[in-house]
Image (cartoon, rainbow, N blue to C red):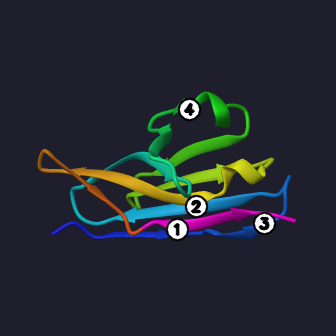
Amino acid sequence: QVQLVESGGGLVQPGGSLRLSCAASGASTVLGWYRQAPGKGREWVALIPGSYADFVKDRFIISRDNAKNTVYLQMNSLKPEDTAVYYCRVRFDGADYWGQGTQVTVSS
């Protein structure tokens, strides 16, 4: 059984910052972060060890704490268009799993 705990979302003003966390259980591997905005499909945002979608380059940083099996997404210079539910994706025993998502809202 894979357990994922995502946290760190919230409401922030444009230009602000948030840090998301994804803690995974056991021998699972966190692959990265994705997001889904209202009315849109899910899109990838950042992948371990350090690939970024063009729309977040130079603003977001992905990092990993191996001891805690946790991946972080530091989000800076947030824009209203970053508003979405953010999900982490984990691989375990050849299958991929998704967290429950954490809402990020960027609004003044």
Tell me the element at label 4. strand
Badge 2 is on which residue?
20
Separation of residues labelled 1 and 3 (CA atoms): 13 Å
Looking at the image, residue 97 sits to the left or right of residue 55; the answer is left
Separation of residues labelled 4 and 3 (CA atoms): 22 Å
Badge 3 is on which residue?
12
Q: Main secondary structure of the magenta part?
A: strand
Residue 55 against residue 79 in the figure, above or below: above
Circle 1: residue type: Thr
- Quarter-of-image position of residue 67: bottom left
Circle 2: residue type: Leu
Please report the bounds of the magenta region as a residue range. 101-108
Tell me the element at label 1. strand
Separation of residues labelled 2 and 4 (CA atoms): 15 Å
Badge 4 is on which residue?
52
Separation of residues labelled 1 and 2 (CA atoms): 8 Å
Q: Position of residue 68 (x, y in %)?
A: 41, 62
Tell me the element at label 3. strand
Q: Within 10 Å of the Cα at label 1, are there few (<14), some (14-19), or many (20+) other Cα atoms?
A: many
Q: Residue at x 77, y 51 (%)?
A: 78
Looking at the image, residue 75 sits to the left or right of residue 96; the answer is right
- Front residue of this view, candidates 33 and 27: 33
Q: Position of residue 4 (x, y in %)?
A: 34, 67
Badge 1 is on which residue?
102
Q: Position of residue 84 (x, y in %)?
A: 59, 58
Circle 4: residue type: Tyr
Q: Nearer the viewer, mark 1 or mark 2?
A: 1
Q: Within 10 Å of the Cα at label 4, are there few (<14), some (14-19), or many (20+) other Cα atoms?
A: many
Q: Nearer the viewer, mark 2 or mark 3?
A: 3
